[in-house]
Amino acid sequence: MKKILLLLLFTGVLISCSDDDDVQENDASILGTWFLVEANNVPNFSINECTSQSYLSFMADNTANSEFFTNAAGECESESSSGDWSNSSGSQYTFTVPGFGELTGTVSFNGDRFTFTPNDIPTSSLTFEK
């Protein structure tokens, strides 16, 4: 009888452990300030001295700040935004990008870089670096 109780207890402990730790680990990976280093297939947007100043900052309280720079009539202009960010499942994140609005997409981490591919425009991506 003790063996059955121990087996049930052990099974219950294993079942109660979920992959929540993985989500928290992913969330910790995105925290910090990230600067834009690549823009692939983004209409009317390219990386240059001005636009490379663009950044996203993710905080542990699920708030985010961002500033994106663009060339307008030969001038480097910026647009700022603040709001919330969320991780809906593993690699799916939602946050606001100035000039693009609220976006949901896949984040792929590679060392001190992450690439964001919006769900609405799967052929486009933005890469950021810490």
Image (cartoon, rainbow, N blue to C red):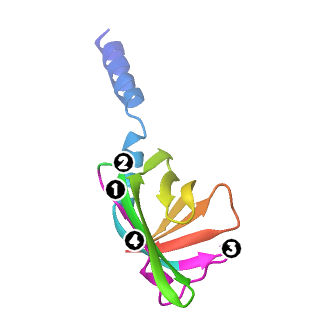
Which mark is on residue 24? Answer: 2
Of residue 15 and residue 9, the one placed in the foreground of this image is 15
Q: Nearer the viewer, mark 3 or mark 4?
A: 3
Identify residue type, mark 4: Trp
**Magenta stretch in the rendered image:** 38-60
Disc 3 and disc 1 in contact, CB within 8 angstroms: no
Residue annotated with mark 3? 43
Give the CA separation, mark 1 to mark 2.
6 Å
Disc 2 and disc 3 in contact, CB within 8 angstroms: no
Residue 106 lies in quadrant? bottom right
Q: Is residue 42 magenta?
A: yes
Residue 99, image x, y percentages: 55, 66
Q: Quadrant of the N terminus?
A: top left
Q: Is residue 49 magenta?
A: yes
Residues packed near mark 2 inside 10 Å, few (<14), some (14 to 19) or many (20 plus): few
Of residue 103 and residue 105, the one placed in the foreground of this image is 103
Q: Earlier in the sequence, mark 3 or mark 1?
A: 1
Q: Earlier in the sequence, mark 3 or mark 4?
A: 4
Disc 3 and disc 4 in contact, CB within 8 angstroms: no
Residues packed near mark 3 inside 10 Å, few (<14), some (14 to 19) or many (20 plus): few
Identify residue type, mark 1: Ala
Residue annotated with mark 4? 34
Residues packed near mark 1 inside 10 Å, few (<14), some (14 to 19) or many (20 plus): few
Give the CA separation, mark 4 to mark 2.
19 Å
Give the CA separation, mark 1 to mark 4.
13 Å
Give the CA separation, mark 3 to mark 1.
31 Å
